[in-house]
Amino acid sequence: MASKSIQSKAGDSVPAALIPRLSALRQRMAELKLDAYLLTHAPDIAQFTGFSGHDSTALITPTGQTVVTDSRYTEELSLAAPHARLVLRTKSMADALTQAIGKAKSTRIGFETNFITYGLVDGLKRSLRKSGKSAALVPVTDMMVTLRKNKDSDEIAAIRKAVEIAEKAFLEVVSKVKPGVSESELTGKLILAMRSRGASDAAFHPIIATGAHSSLPHYRPDATPVANDAALLVDWGAIYQGYRSDLTRTVFIGKPNRKLVEIYKIVLEANLATIDKLKAGLNCKAADAIARKIITRAGYGKQFGHGLGHGIGRDIHEEPRLHASRDKDHLQTGSVVTVEPGIYLPGIGGVRIEDDVLITDTGCEVLSSLEKSLDSATSIVRG
């Protein structure tokens, strides 16, 4: 049974929010002499079609959009992207894409090397040869991540809401923490609190690390009970309308270790000093260096091993990257980045403080509003 092609209904128009995004994509296609662009990464498909189903692909041409999916998403596509042509996949994705390429009469198709699988590229080449269609597949790197780097007003509004949801959930859950509750139970409560406030899900699996576990930057919560007189590091975020927030706060249960108090002050200084200097045009390596210099000067440079931050949006890690290796990249107006310096002391614990920040022409706007002073870190848990 061949894949079915279904044309969008007459009169269906592209939503206003998609028009500038598609214009920017089509301009890059023209520059690269491409008459189609293949999208295989779900966030990219949502960004340029409005459809967010999985196990799908999209083909963007100078005049239209085709989404290749299966019967599970037929109704969803008709509601989310009625302006797009549907190719209903009944066999392989490669065969269905070959049909879509034939319908569009495309001969030079770009694809994003960052996300596509070798199996799909190889399968598509074989399917095109078998069908007798002469179409060239052109590998392109970083076009999608570059186009999605700077957010429009709709995207920024969604990220703001994702931040708001995450913060309210955090205050509800963490302010009532008592020693003995497990990290895993707190994780579940936090996810539930975000979803009950309108999040579709957590932006990633939250990190809730008690005591010495907080020295592990990407720790995975387990059944360990929250300890008294110890740090509790919480790294979490929410998804709202497809967009993500990413926050970290370190709080103290009971009386904190003096060494943790010391590094908390250093990390907070690095966080605030960096945010004070962020603006469009700032070199990404230089942004990282602001925080790194403060932490290194205090004697903890080797205990700050990761980059200062990263972009957020439909993916939890996007461009730009605030990292020592990014000496050729600069911040741009409209990017939303995390600022998350940290110090991690094995066997003792760690401190990370992370905010979500919108880059503007004249500076930046901190989208997160949770308190982060040492006083707040030692008083938020009421027991």
Image (cartoon, helix red, strand yellow):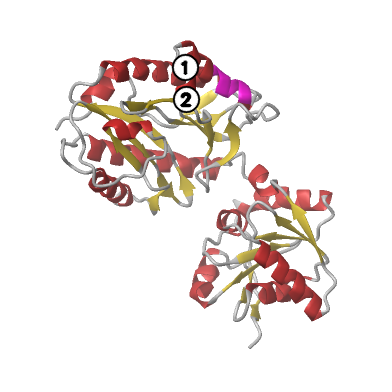
Going from the N terminus, do you reach mark 2 or mark 1 first? 1
Q: Position of residue 341 (x, y in %)?
A: 46, 25
- What amino acid is at disc 2? Phe
Q: Is residue 362 visible?
A: no
- What amino acid is at disc 1? Ile
Crowd around label 1: few <14 · some 14–19 · many ≥20 (10 Å):
many
Which residue is pictured at 59% across the width and 57% down the height? Answer: 41
Specify whether residue 13 is painted magenta.
no
In this rendering, the answer to whether 47 lies above or below 334 is below
Label 1 belongs to which residue?
A: 295
Which residue is pictured at 36% across the width and 31% down the height? Answer: 215
Specify whether residue 289 is painted magenta.
yes
Quarter of image, res 247:
top left
Please name whichever residue, 206 or 28, is drawn nearer the observer in this view of the structure.
206
Quarter of image, res 264:
top left
Q: Element at badge 2?
A: loop
Label 2 belongs to which residue?
A: 304
Query: Is residue 227 rendered to the left or right of residue 107?
Result: left
Q: Element at badge 1?
A: helix
Main secondary structure type of the part rendered in magenta: helix
Please name whichever residue, 151 or 45, is drawn nearer the observer in this view of the structure.
45
